[in-house]
Image (spheres, rainbow, N blue to C red):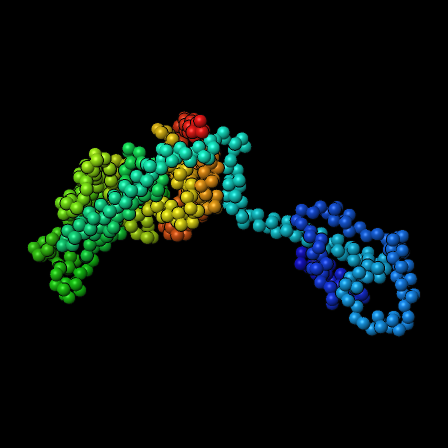
Amino acid sequence: MAAALALVLAMLGTVLQPLSISDHMDMGRVLQPLNISDHVDVGTVLQLLSFSDPTDVGMEQRMQQHEEQLSHLTAQELATMMQEAPSALFRRDMVFTTWDSRQLGAFAGGLVLLLGLFWMSPRQDNGSDKGRGNEEQEAVGTVHSLSPEQPLDSPRRQALESFCEQHLQGRVQDVALTCQAVQELVDNLLHACHVISLTTFLPRLEPGIGVGSSFEGWSHGGEDTVYRVLVRLKPPPGHSFRLQPDADGELPARHGRVRVKLKCMCKREQLLGDVLCFRHHSYEQVRRHQRPELLQILCAESYLDVEKTAHWLQLFVRNAWDVIAAQQNCQLAVLPSSRSCHLQLTYNSGRTVHVEMMLGVQQDEVGVFVGSQEAETDLSNTTWLESCALHELLFFRCVARQAPHGSCHLTCLQLLTYLLGDSVLSPAHLKTVTMHLLTLLPPSEWCPQRLLERLRDILHYLHRCLEERQLHHFLVGNERVPRELSLPAAFQAASPINLFQRLAREPQAQALHELTQLQHRLQSLSH
């Protein structure tokens, strides 16, 4: 391509050289007015460049006029004109009138070839990039095909906003206030637990992090709302934690175990004298001089026991509540739970709030593993379950920083989950679809004025996923996940996980029917 272009330019230079204009005329300026687009038809170009024969009548008349003008000039005027440097405008006007037929034909042929190369060049480049950008083209195609061929008979945006104000706005504000109250109460409890545990060799409790729909901002505050707080454990002095994920497990719900190892404390023993090294003193010596260590109380065969740890946390929370109860405006009850700490808060108004404190162990290169109450019942006591709750919370926070004021992505989830009811579909499916769309559409497309369009997009995207029985997990094998989330390496390197892979045909038909009903409920809001 480059060689052909150089050859054409050389031909044009040869043609232009006898006319002494190559040093004064920029070929880019000559070609620029033509404004050749990528889609110009070759035949059209050839037709526009079909020059007339220099011996036609118009040409002869112009030449005669020049001869008549020159005949009236004196010899001195002619000499003066020849000595003066001709202007660029004069040369540009005279160039085609002074060429002979061979020069004009050569120029026309070279110019046609040059324009033809320009016309073909972008298409060749696009063809070479076809393999490199397949995924981006597919994603863009997905965005442009979100709305169905026949638009939904959806309610007007004003009617939707009015419904949200009447039925959801108060609920959403109440959820936000409850999240603040829960976070403050849990912080107070954990601070008291930390003070109590300072004299023990039991796990240290890090500040709680609210996770789930309520703290992500899209819960509509139903009666069954549970406010979940992740409480990460740190090893006490003289101990270390090592997460060991199940090598055969499947992301993002791998099982894992937490190995507890003893660390040498001889230096602290020598400098401070407040502890005995667990590794270099006998069990009898340590037992006589200091409290039992973690391995003896909360572990089974050197692995942290989920149930023992949950019961230990429940005991600590009861003791901590005795310390802070006088400053609180509610009553606290610790409910039975085998793998987490489930709290019931009862306020003077009679309102009840349920809080689940989920125990977790985190390592950056592996991720977060929790002992949640929602885990399968057949798990062993030393098995912890991998959780994506923290990274999903970080994603919604990342979106909030980039989204326009009043972004409608949370309203979409609040409205759709409110209308969903009992269904084969779950709020998690709607959440996954919305997370995908948040990375496919620019933030400006989620402004409040786009609420109706985004609701259509979510429903159509989910409908297509159900038909194809393919909905990919958002965090696993997805290159569009923001880097700020700092996903574990295993998530980034894994192949996409299809959440609908095991969806049988009967539940699939039921889900499609329920999705249609959800669409009808949305349409009825305009009446």
Q: Which residue shows up at 78% across the image and 58% down it?
A: 107
Would you place residue 484 above or below residue 141 in this image?
below
| Residue at the extreme left | 288
- Locate residue 258, reporting x and y percent: 25, 48
In front of the other: 352 or 349: 349
One can see residue 370 in this view: no
The answer to whether 318 appears left or right of 502 in the picture is left
Residue 1 found in image quarter? bottom right
Residue 379 found in image quarter? top left
One can see residue 200 in this view: yes
In front of the other: 143 or 377: 143
Q: Which residue shows up at 44% across the image and 26% down it?
A: 527
- Locate residue 202, reporting x and y percent: 17, 51
Q: Which residue shows up at 12% across the image and 63% down it?
A: 273
In front of the other: 94 or 233: 94
The answer to whether 427 appears left or right of 47 in the picture is left
So how many labels did they put on this image? Answer: 0
The answer to whether 342 appears left or right of 363 in the picture is left
In front of the other: 500 or 326: 326
Q: Which residue shows up at 35% across the image and 37% down it?
A: 169
The answer to whether 96 appears left or right of 42 in the picture is right
- Locate residue 31, reporting x and y percent: 71, 56
